Image (tube, helix red, strand yellow):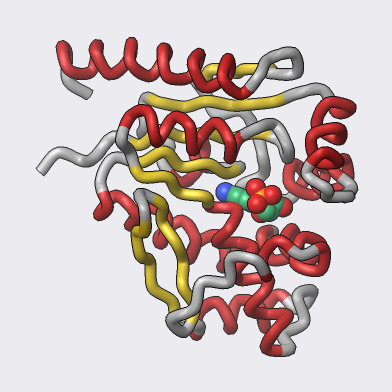
Amino acid sequence: MKTPVVIAIDGTSASGKSTNAKLVAQALGFVYVDTGAMYRTLAWHCLKTGVNVDDLQAVAAACRRWKTELVCVDQQVRLRVGGYYPEKEIRTAETSAAVPRVAAIPKVREWMKKTQRSCVKFGPLVMEGRDIGTHVFPETDFKFYLDALPDERARRRAAEGVQENLAERDQRDSQRAAAPLMIALGATVINNSKMTSAETSSRLIAEIQKRLATVEKHGL
Ligand code: DC
């Protein structure tokens, strides 16, 4: 059986990954996967069950033992813990502060990679994150990296009502040893500081359709 197409969208915090990945998935009829939400879910689970997020071994053990399942609802993948999807809880300031710590642990990243790769069972994917083109699906021909100027990214977060230290988060994400945030080889880089999400997603869709036509003609 042919492996479904995977569109990898990586980039800095508040660079428009989620908005654009969702728009692209809708336009193409693909399934959307937010991998940041999966790391957030583990951070939330640790906080809730009293696991110290700075204790590497304790977090790795929690990740080995937690009872999860992947489900696809309205063309979006959700990670459920004990049958529950903590949609709101994973967006709190407390979870946001804990998640880069959890995401820096190699055993956690191994678990996430395996789980994220298994999402192809749902069909063609648009997967957004920090390491999708570099580590999770390095074999895909569809790699994108979104970025925007720091001031513009801070403005976008503030408009969403979220106060967060983006510079610190980006530094943690790009300087960790395990799968740091970086531009994948062959990725198309889009700096969308001066673009609307309609413009960014149109650019992504046009690029993807061009490549899909080539793949159909010549194979992957
Ligand atoms: O995209 P987000 O803000 O929901 O991501 C939450 C955190 O998880 C952020 O610190 C980066 C990290 N992350 C990661 O390390 N790798 C991914 N593939 C996705 C997110």
Indicate the quadrant containing the N terminus: top left, top right, bottom left or bottom right: top left
Is residue 178 visible in the rendered image? The answer is no
Residue 65: tell me if it is visible. yes
Is the residue 132 above or below the residue 177 in the image? above
Coordinates of residue 188 in the picture (x, y in percent): 53, 17
- What x and y, as percent, mark residue 79? 46, 66
Rendering quarter of residue 3: top left
93 w.r.t. 62: above or below = above
Residue 138 pos. (x, y %):
43, 36
Horizontal arrangement in the rendering, residue 135 relative to residue 55 (left or right): left
Residue drawn at x 22%, y 24% as measured from the top left: 220
Q: Is residue 44 left or right of residue 127?
A: right
Labels in figure, total:
0
The residue nearer to you, when weighing 64 against 26, is: 26
In this rendering, is residue 176 above or below 197? below
207 to the left or right of 218 = right
Side of 24 where 42 appears, left or right: right
Q: Residue at x 35, y 49 (%)?
A: 75
Residue shown at the point (77%, 82%) measured from the top left: 52
Question: Residue 140 placed where, x, y %?
Answer: 37, 32
As drawn, which residue projects farthest toward the left? Answer: 1
Q: Residue furthest bottom?
A: 50
- Residue plotted at (52% across, 22% down): 201
